[in-house]
Image (cartoon, helix red, strand yellow):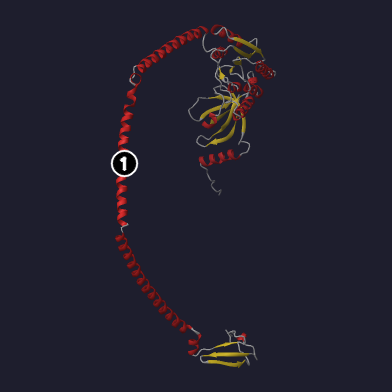
């Protein structure tokens, strides 16, 4: 009879397949291209699908990865993505978790754009130029195509708002492989010529390939080296290039760029000048009137009409100080006189005799106390010496010998305390309580221990 097979739960089977997906090295990083479908932007993580003519795969893009995108994805866009394929246990469907996404065909350019942007930003190139535009410019350089609509829009706006402004065109290619070198050449010409209050650089809208010359590092560094404020007007409002970051100001259109360098119409400027003149005149008249009023108040002040009153208070203070000085002097003189009287009294001959006698009596008393103290100290020291001598006698060798002990010395008086110190045939001297006993060593014995 066949054994009944072990039946798996759906969860165990799904977990087994999920681990297969996660451990497969070919699925840990997948490069995929497809069309976005079922896309609806959510506030957090994004869930949609990628498809082609024959298949579709579910997509998960977490909030952190979606926040790094440099474009706004939408339904129907063909994109390139990088991610890992995994299995979602709750639905049992496989999906791709996207880490990077770029529009199809321009992924490489976007990568170059981001790398250059980070590099120049780290160097501080974007924060280098933050210069204000001159309010009343006289001469502005424009680098753009001579046949495009950019220069026409700029000239039309300037003619309408500020016709006295001189526009100098530096024609350049704004599209193609040779565009970046020609732009750099014209930037150097503008810098060498000098005398410009501002520089406008721009072109019309287009794809990222069309706008790429304005993302070149050579153009960015040449712009950063320009001595005048720069207004960038490249592409449409939604287009952003490296030139926009390097420039001091960015305009969405050529017309807006011309309005930036001509912040007021000429008639408005003349009106403002007249208004400023009136304000200055009025301010000066107000200041003159205020000065006259202060002069009149000063001419009528007590200081000028009755200058003697300035010293009244000081004279009163001088009198008060003089009185205080006189009183203080009298107090000090009285105190000194009292001290003189006391000194004279203390120097009286009768007083001196009494003080000398008292001092002699004090000296005699001190001498007696000193002698008594010295005798007491000597007696105390003698008693201590006698006690110490008695204690020393008890500890002396004679006392020990009196109790039946003795000790032996060699010919040179050195104490012999060990068996090895006694040499057979050698002389020794035994010390007892009442004398010494000469002996000759015949033999010696070593006890164990």
Most foreground residue, 26 or 190? 190
Instruction: Classify residue 363 by image quadrant.
Output: bottom left
Q: Residues within 10 Å of mark 1 (few under 14, many from 20)?
A: few
- Quarter of the C terminus within the rendering: bottom right
Q: Which residue is mark 1?
A: 328
Q: Position of residue 441 (x, y in %)?
A: 62, 91
Most foreground residue, 394 or 350? 350
Instruction: Classify residue 195 by image quadrant.
Output: top right
Residue 96 as seen in the image, left or right of residue 359: right
Identity of the residue drawn at 59% across and 34% down: 84
Q: How many marks?
A: 1
Q: Position of residue 443 (x, y in %)?
A: 63, 91
Identity of the residue drawn at 35% across and 71% down: 369
Residue 300 as seen in the image, left or right of residue 400: left
Circle 1 SS class: helix
Q: Residue furthest front?
A: 349
Most foreground residue, 204 or 61? 204
* Residue 409 visible here: yes
Q: Is residue 391 above or below residue 41?
A: below
* Residue 62 visible here: no
Instruction: Classify residue 78 by image quadrant.
Output: top right
Q: Position of residue 152 (x, y in %)?
A: 60, 8
Identity of the residue drawn at 59% across and 93% down: 438
Most foreground residue, 54 or 312? 312
């Amino acid at each position: 009879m066949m054994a009944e097979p072990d039946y798996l739960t759906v969860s165990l089977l799904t977990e087994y397949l999920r681990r297969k997906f996660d451990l497969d090295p070919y699925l840990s990083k997948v490069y995929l291209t497809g069309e976005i479908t079922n896309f609806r932007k959510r506030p957090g993580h994004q869930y949609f699908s990628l498809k082609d003519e024959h298949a579709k795969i579910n997509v998960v893009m977490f909030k952190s990865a979606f926040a790094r995108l440099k474009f706004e994805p939408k339904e129907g866009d063909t994109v390139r993505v990088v991610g890992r394929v995994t299995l979602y246990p709750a639905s049992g469907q496989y999906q791709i978790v996207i880490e990077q996404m770029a529009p199809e065909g321009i992924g490489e350019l976007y990568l170059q754009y981001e790398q250059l942007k980070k590099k120049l930003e780290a160097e501080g190139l974007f924060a280098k130029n933050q210069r204000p535009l001159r309010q009343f410019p006289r001469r502005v350089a424009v680098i753009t195509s001579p046949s495009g609509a950019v220069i026409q829009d700029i000239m039309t706006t300037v003619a309408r708002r500020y016709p006295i402004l001189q526009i100098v065109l530096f024609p350049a290619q704004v599209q193609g492989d040779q565009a970046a070198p020609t732009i750099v050449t014209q930037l150097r010409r503008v810098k060498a010529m000098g005398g410009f209050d501002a520089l406008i650089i721009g072109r019309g809208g287009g794809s990222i390939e069309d706008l790429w010359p304005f993302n070149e590092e050579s153009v960015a560094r040449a712009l950063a080296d320009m001595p005048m404020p720069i207004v960038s007007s490249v592409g449409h409002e939604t287009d952003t290039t490296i030139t926009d970051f390097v420039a001091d100001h960015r305009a969405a259109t050529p017309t807006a760029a011309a309005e930036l360098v001509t912040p007021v119409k000429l008639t408005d400027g003349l009106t403002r000048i007249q208004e400023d003149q009136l304000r200055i005149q009025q301010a000066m008249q107000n200041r003159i009137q205020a000065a006259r009023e202060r002069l009149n108040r000063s001419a009528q002040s007590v200081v000028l009409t009755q200058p003697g009153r300035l010293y009244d208070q000081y004279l009163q203070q001088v009198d008060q100080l003089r009185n205080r000085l006189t009183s203080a002097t009298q107090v000090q003189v009285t105190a000194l006189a009292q001290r003189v009287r006391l000194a004279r009294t203390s120097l009286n001959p009768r007083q001196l005799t009494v003080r000398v006698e008292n001092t002699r009596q004090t000296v005699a008393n001190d001498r007696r106390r000193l002698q008594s103290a010295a005798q007491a100290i000597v007696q105390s020291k003698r008693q201590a010496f006698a006690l110490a001598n008695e204690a020393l006698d008890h500890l002396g060798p004679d006392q020990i010998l009196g109790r039946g002990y003795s000790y032996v010395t060699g010919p040179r008086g050195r104490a012999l305390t060990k068996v090895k110190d006694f040499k057979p045939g050698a002389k020794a001297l035994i010390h007892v309580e009442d004398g010494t006993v000469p002996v000759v060593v015949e033999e010696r014995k070593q006890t164990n221990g």
